[in-house]
Image: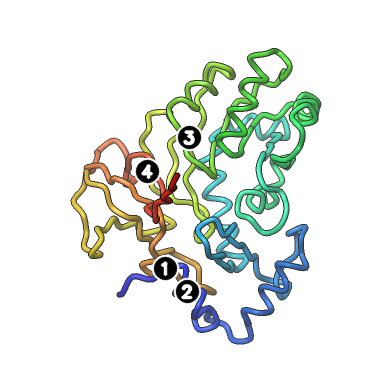
Amino acid sequence: FPIVNKKIIMDSLEEVFTQQGIVKSDLEKFIEQDQAGKSLFQNKYIILNTSGSSGLTGIFLFDQKFWNILVATLTARLIPLSIFKFIFRKTKIVFLGETSGHHSGVSIVRSAPDLFIPLSLSISTPKEVLVEALNKFKPHVLTGYASAIESLAQEKLSGRLKVSPEIIISSGEPLTPLRQKNIQNAFKIPAFDFYGATECLAIGIDNTGSGTLNIFDDIIVLETLDENNAPVPQGQLGKIVITVLGNKIQPLVRYALDDEIIIKPNSDKTPFTQAERVLGRNMENLTFTI
């Protein structure tokens, strides 16, 4: 199969959908009108859209069955708390990021199982308001953008933030070694490094702080290719190409992302493919003249 990307999918969006009657202009109108991001398209489809930071906004649909599978898989991998804690209490989870619209992070939190009490806080909220809200809510799980969590780590060290989350999940941007160090110094636990994408939600997670991602092989097939779209050997840097397993409404087969990654040699210690940390987008460089 040939490699596709966001532009190809968006240029042929109505041909990609497996159900008739889904029109691109209707999707765009729905996203614009539903700023709260809490409604279903045609009362049955979850719709997500990318931020457009790469220069092109992507629109992706999920039916309820596949979405439930994704959320259940993410919950099992991201929140490995003891079952006894679920039985005897409601687990409070906070998401700190973009809280409006149909972005992936907040959409996952909105779909949290009944075992959780979710709270979404916008990164644009003044820091003193965030600290007050978190001190009142006392979350067991803190998740959000890496830079936002690092900022809260400074508040924790200053003594203004008085929460002690049991799990911290960083997503949305790179969790650099320095950010990880600052977070761990403040909260005394490492942050889980979750790497996902709007197109499929989950790609990999490092829940040990080791810098190694376990790939969600039960959700995607991940390839690493060179500039000629030929496979690269394990241990070498390659662009990420994924095939999403289970999305019957908008299939993505050999879909290229903007990120690059290194697949590690097979290990007997885990059933999952393992990879080095994501190395970021391979895009055009900006040139400044003085």
Q: Are marks 2 and 4 in contact (CB under 8 Å)?
A: no
Q: Is residue 78 above or below residue 47?
A: above
Give the image quarter of residue 241.
Answer: bottom left
SS state under label 1: loop
Earlier residue among tags 3 and 4: 3
Seen at 74% across and 29% down, the residue is 127
Instruction: Where is residue 75? Give x, y as percent.
Output: 57, 44
Q: What type is the residue that disc 3 sits on?
A: Leu
Q: Is residue 223 above or below residue 59?
A: above
Look at mark 3 in the image and give the residue it sits on.
175
Total numbered circles: 4
Closer-to-camera residue (106/285) = 285
Q: What type is the residue that disc 2 sits on?
A: Ile
Q: Tell me the CA gap for discs 3 and 4.
A: 11 Å
Instruction: Where is residue 183? Give x, y as percent.
Output: 54, 23
SS state under label 2: helix
Earlier residue among tags 2 and 4: 2
Q: Tell me the CA gap for discs 2 and 1.
A: 6 Å
Closer-to-camera residue (101/216) = 101
Q: Tell me the CA gap for discs 1 and 4.
A: 19 Å
Look at mark 4 in the image and give the residue it sits on.
279
Task: Answer few, some or many: residues within 10 Å of disc 3's Cα (few below 14, many 20 plus, some between 14 and 19).
Answer: many
Look at mark 2 in the image and give the residue it sits on.
9
Residue furthest toward the bottom? 20
Closer-to-camera residue (62/198) = 198
Look at mark 1 in the image and give the residue it sits on.
5
